Amino acid sequence: MTGYSINLKSDSSITEIPTAEIRQQLPIISPKISHFSPLVHQRIDLMLLGLEALNVGGTERILQLSQQLGLKDIIKNRIFLWRLRCTNPLRRSYQRNYLNMEEVKALVVLIHYLAKSFEVKIRQHLIDAQLMKDKGLPVDNHYHLSSYLERFRNSFANRMNPRRVKVMNYLNNEDLLNELALSVLNQLLIAGGTRGIERLWVSLWDGEVN
Amino acid sequence: MNINRQYHSSNCSLILEGLSNEGFNLDILLNAECKIISSDISLTGGRVFLENLVKVVNAYTQDLLSGLHHPQTLNLESDLIHLKPNGYLHRLTWQKTKDYTEDATEIDLNTVELFDLVEVIDQFLSDTTTLPDLTVPLEPLSKRHRQDGQPLSEKTVPAFVGIGTVALAAIAAFVIEPPVVREPQPQPLEGTTETIPLNQSQDSPNPTTSP
């Protein structure tokens, strides 16, 4: 995979970025596996949640970018995107089905480009989090960081099923949920890197192959 | 003529110096230098150093993505490098020689610095004109490394609760006395009708029956 530069603008000057070849190059590491485990679906949805929380109006940004990336055949509209994300077993609206490989590839590419576009913000949030921890202060006390954390917590509470033990543990412990939000930022930073697509794709197969 | 390649990110630089077999490729490495700008430390070495650095950073970065530990397999000839979490930081340890006669260099990196180190390494690996034979493919971990996110204690608690309940029930059943089974005793019948044959006596009083 060759290097490339990204120049995504938030205004109307949309540049199309063809991703069909990139997606095609992502190897199916184990052809016997028809779909990933529920845990992988959970990871993907949480990364998208983090990306939405980085920006007010994040869902619109996701849809706009999916069009730019030529993913409209998979992420047709808001409803389709919602259905794809309802494969996360922690969701209230869990659909009990799985993403197929093409859908996962599309979301991996989408996550990479979104994370790349938010790289400055992600870096700043992580630096701010570290400064707060160095001073022994709650991460939530930092003004800009707290906006991201609050949006993440609210989205998590609104969308996840509180009857799941894992969800309940997070909802009962704000610090734990903040740490989840920060660990998602760590993953997004890596996913937005030069080899981010490849790294994220291969990491989804961790623990899935024989 | 020496060939120089440099890869930069905000917090890190990777500088490679070497020779070419032919053309403009850097085919033979003479020296590699990895600078961590924040700590003003340079890690230097040859081919073994560079390979070990790439392998360790590669493995650790995949750890952060999936949460599963990837073995950091090294060439143990020299330049022993290790990365591990240190609280919310990441500790990079570099032991130049394998016989431990000198102190190891330790650097604590925050996540942004670690990402910048990953970036310069990935830029190098993506550069097909530099050491094209040095490849570190990304490979996933097998199922036996998998943790499904649930601590072992949470998985085993229901089993122990079930076994404990059965054990308690068995103890209770042992303590409680079993019911005594008594054979039924024949009971005398009251007020039964006695039938006297007619040819025995006419003076016998008529049999009476009790209500």
Image: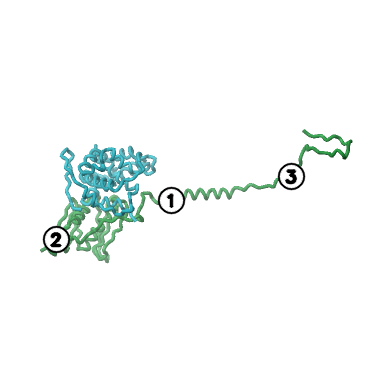
Chain colours: A cyan, B green
Tags 1 and 2 on a common chain:
yes
Residue A194 spot, x, y in % from top left = 20, 51
Q: Tell me whether the residue at label 2 lies in contact with that at label 3, contact meaning CB atoms closer than 8 angstroms.
A: no
Image quarter where the C terminus of chain A lies is bottom left
Q: Is residue A172 left or right of residue A185?
A: right
N-term-proximal mark, 1 vs 2: 2
Q: Which residue is mark 1?
A: B156
Of circles 1 and 3, which is in front? 3
Q: Which residue is mark 3?
A: B186
Answer above or below: position of B18 versus A184.
Answer: below
Q: For numbered disc 3, what is the local secondary structure? A: loop
Compute the Cα span from label 1 to label 3.
57 Å
Residue B23 falls in image quadrant: bottom left
Compute the Cα span from label 1 to label 2.
56 Å
Q: Amino acid at mark 3?
A: Pro
Q: Which mark is residue B3?
A: none
Q: Is residue A117 left or right of residue B182?
A: left
N-term-proximal mark, 1 vs 3: 1
Q: Amino acid at mark 2?
A: Asn
Q: Amino acid at mark 1?
A: Thr
Compute the Cα span from label 2 to label 3.
112 Å
Residue A34 spot, x, y in % from top left = 33, 50
Residue B179 spot, x, y in % from top left = 63, 47
Q: Which residue is mark 2?
A: B25
Q: Residue furthest left?
A: B1
N-term-proximal mark, 2 vs 3: 2
Residue A79 spot, x, y in % from top left = 29, 38
Q: Residue furthest top?
A: B211
Q: Which chain is home to disc 3?
A: B
Q: Tell me whether the residue at label 1 lies in contact with that at label 2, contact meaning CB atoms closer than 8 angstroms.
A: no
